[in-house]
Image (cartoon, rainbow, N blue to C red):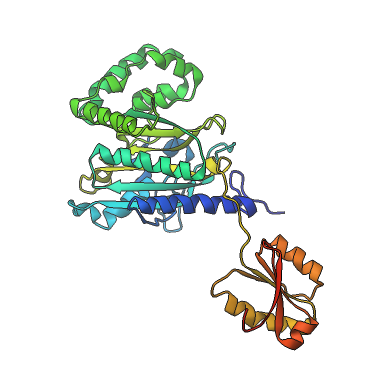
Amino acid sequence: MIKALRGMKDLTFEESERFVHIVTTATTIAKRYGYSYIETPILEETKLFKRSVGESSDIVGKEMYQFEDKGGNDVCMRPEGTAGVVRSFVQAKLDRRQNEKFKFYYYGPMFRYERPQKGRLREFHQFGCESFGEASVYEDFTIIQMIGDIFKALGIGYKLKINSLGCPECMPPYRQNLVEFLTECKDELCEDCNRRIETNPIRVLDCKNEKCQSLLVNSPKLIKNLCSSCDDDFAKLERLLKSENIEYELDTNLVRGLDYYSKTAFEFVSNEIGSQSAIAGGGRYDRLVEFLDGKSTPAVGFALGIERIMELVKMPEVKRSGYYLGAMDEEAIDSLFPLASKKRDTEKVTVEYAPKKLKAHLKNADRVNARYCAVIGEDEFKDRTIWIKDLVEKKEVVVAWEEL
């Protein structure tokens, strides 16, 4: 028997309903905030992610589904959504429209080759939003507010963590201080962290190794080394969050997993999904458009992991809806289809193709969660009528086909 590949799974039945509910809810709220839908390809040139996510990141170094296609092109399955949206933004020359603002939302599959575990798959799905052209920290706050609205609508509790990653002015001196600190304790750091000291020392802060994290308690904190502009923005973000009674925690080691972030970084975490506690995250990436050959454009965005939150989502009660149509005699079955066609203009309709007794039809109608069970028996067929039972109100009526 052929099975799905390891780390990739089917979405069916209750899971698929939950998936659609999450996407529908997030989409509805994103539209309220002025976002429009964008679709980007699953397959992109590998260099897109090397230049955006960063060659020193684990995603590019260890996890990408990368291969050479039949045309000799170096391509990969997208490991995240932001880079593709930025590439599309630049390709469409939207970066040249400097006085305009653009807001996009997207959802779809992403791919990373890593060890499958709870909350982590090799094919997983994200919902994300990207805002271009707005440099104000008010936009950072608004995106955090939007994510909170999404989780509130889905019935999910969370904790918000925030940090500032600084800018090209305050990052270099901090980086030097951090390298000096890490060099002194490098013999006690893990192999990955030792490699990162040379390639991207900021990523050491993101290490999940418990011993490394214990050593980093005394590391220099970027939040205490911000330039005046970054410091003012972060203080304003904190004031905005407090003014709206949005609880948050300052996490000085929060750097996110991607190299393109600067200034605001944030994560929404849940303690209900085990060690993989991040359920959404994002931040500002004002230089990424420029990195991908576009004109300098401020930008901020986020993504949430759909599989991560599926178990946490409180599904709304599914109410009975639509019609179930059936016949008790073979000769009446053909008459169901014109009735169903008319009724489908306004209602969901399920048609049973085989003749059955009334009790069986009622059981089937219950199984498909129909509001009305409508059956044509021998007498009804002769009279061109149909028996209908409201399965909620428990009322019965017989009406002419035309009245249905």
Q: Is 116 left, or right, of 134 in this rendering?
A: right
Whole-percent x and y of residue 27? 43, 53
State the image coordinates of residue 147 (x, y, percent, origin top left): 41, 42
Q: Residue 34 vs residue 347: left or right?
A: left
| Residue appearing at x 37%, y 50% in the figure | 84
Give above or below for 51 relative to 162. Answer: below
Q: Which corner quadrant of the image does residue 56 belong to?
A: top left
Name the quadrant of the N terminus: bottom right
* Viewer-closest of 121 and 192: 121
Where is residue 352 shown, x and y percent of the image? 72, 72
Instruction: Evaluate whether residue 53 shows in this view.
Output: no
Q: Quarter of the image holding residue 341?
A: bottom right
Query: Is residue 363 in view?
Result: yes
Residue at point 19% right, 54% down? 97
Query: Is residue 248 placed above or below 91 in the rendered structure?
Result: above
- Identify the residue at horizontal 58%, vertical 41% (top origin): 311
| Camera-nearest residue between 255 and 111 | 255
